């Protein structure tokens, strides 16, 4: 949201307020500092091992007084987190317009990703303004009965922020071997916890065993179950670096340095292809089908044979690698925030 926030703050005819829930505190602080954002209210809702139901209750309880005090004409939120569904619901209860940035992404399976698919599907019913990143996302919304006049195809502000950060000349402070082919790993999906994630991690360790010139770098999610499994299966390997979660700027630098990415993240499926980095997705389905259709993202699930086969092809076959490393960005051109700002100006 940083690109949108800055555009709104620069508009003398719009009075804006920024509310942070700190659902991802480890990422938030660096973004606030580097993008020079002003936070008007920090709700600080997170607690250790907090169940989703308790997080939802805390968010609604803390958001509602802010909405009551500010009485905004429009509230914006991006993505599919618990923060977004709670913001949309709180606005619905108070009759406040709600604009959903990154609207219309669907897998059509409420269990995958969990709980994000249900979150964004419900938000699609609650939102009054839908800022869809692609034509396919818009089509999903129209198929669900959303008024076409309420949908704007804008691209995704994720790409706006990515291109800005990628152009910054900043050092990367990680012990990455200068000549290694670096594979960036992320994994955190609730639906993969347990045996599926263990199987995927086993395949990644086998990959490191088989390629002396390959280094795996895994910023491990703070979820204690993910952390314990990662250290159990992937720890104590000379070419596997398990590190704490990175701030956004360090993560983008690591993506730029990587050979390819193995991840179950949604956002990385947009970001890495824009940087020319192939992505193997540790999921069986995705809401970001455009990159799969372009051939720059491949779904491999958590099956070890599929993971190893696809990874080895990228490592061993230069033509196969080049076909996936084309620098394709189906999700935006870096001007999504400009389009969202213009749409807001037309309707306020």
Image (cartoon, rainbow, N blue to C red):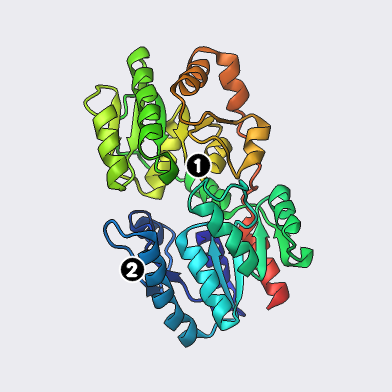
The structure residue drawn at horizontal position 39% and vertical position 22%, both measured from the top left corner, is 203
The structure residue drawn at horizontal position 52% and vertical position 48%, both measured from the top left corner, is 111
Q: Decide if residue 226 is on the left or right side of residue 40.
A: left
The structure residue drawn at horizontal position 55% and vertical position 52%, both measured from the top left corner, is 117
Tag count: 2
Q: Looking at the rendering, which quadrant does residue 292 occupy? A: top right
Q: Which residue is mark 1?
A: 268
Q: Count residues near mark 2 (Cα–Cα under 10 Å), then give few for <14, some for 14-19, many for 20+.
A: some
Q: Point out the residue furthest to the right here.
A: 148
Name the foreground residue: 78 vs 344: 78
Q: Compared to 346, does 269 lie above or below?
A: above
Q: Compared to 110, does 149 lie above or below?
A: below
Q: Compared to 169, does 147 lie above or below?
A: below
At numbered mark 2, what does the secondary structure look like: helix, strand or loop?
loop
Chain-order first, disc 1 or disc 2 = 2
The reply to whether residue 167 is visible in this rendering is: no
> Where does the image place residue 72, in percent across and percent down from the top left?
55, 82
């Amino acid at each position: 949201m940083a690109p949108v926030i800055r555009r709104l703050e620069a508009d003398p005819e719009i009075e804006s307020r920024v509310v942070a829930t700190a659902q991802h505190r480890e990422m938030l602080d660096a973004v606030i500092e580097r993008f020079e954002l002003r936070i008007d209210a920090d709700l600080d809702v997170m607690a250790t091992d907090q169940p989703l139901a308790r997080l939802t209750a805390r968010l609604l309880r803390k958001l509602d007084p802010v909405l009551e005090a500010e009485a905004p004409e429009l509230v914006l939120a991006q993505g599919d987190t618990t923060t977004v569904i709670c913001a949309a619901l709180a606005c619905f209860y108070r009759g406040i317009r709600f604009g959903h940035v990154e609207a219309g992404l669907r897998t059509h399976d409420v269990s995958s990703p969990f709980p994000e698919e249900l979150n964004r599907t419900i938000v699609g019913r609650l939102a009054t303004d839908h800022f869809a990143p692609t034509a396919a996302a818009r089509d999903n919304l129209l198929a669900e009965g959303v008024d076409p006049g309420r949908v704007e195809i804008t691209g995704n502000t994720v790409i706006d922020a990515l291109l800005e950060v990628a152009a910054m000349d900043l050092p990367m402070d990680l012990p990455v071997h200068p000549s290694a082919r670096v594979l960036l790993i992320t994994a955190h999906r609730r639906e993969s916890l347990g045996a599926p994630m263990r199987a995927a991690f086993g395949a990644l360790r086998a990959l490191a065993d088989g390629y002396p010139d390959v280094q795996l770098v895994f910023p491990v999610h703070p979820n204690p179950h993910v952390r314990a499994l990662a250290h159990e299966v992937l720890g104590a390997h000379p070419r596997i670096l398990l590190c704490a979660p990175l701030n956004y700027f360090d993560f983008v630098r690591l993506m730029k340095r990587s050979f390819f990415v193995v991840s179950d993240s949604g956002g990385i499926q947009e970001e890495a292809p824009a940087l020319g980095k192939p992505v193997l997705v540790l999921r069986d389905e995705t809401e970001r089908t455009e990159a799969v259709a372009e051939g720059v993202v491949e779904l491999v699930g958590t099956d070890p044979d599929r993971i190893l086969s696809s990874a080895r092809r990228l490592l061993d076959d230069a033509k196969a690698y080049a076909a996936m490393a084309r620098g394709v960005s189906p999700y935006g051109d870096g001007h999504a925030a400009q389009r969202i700002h213009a749409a807001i100006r037309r309707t306020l």
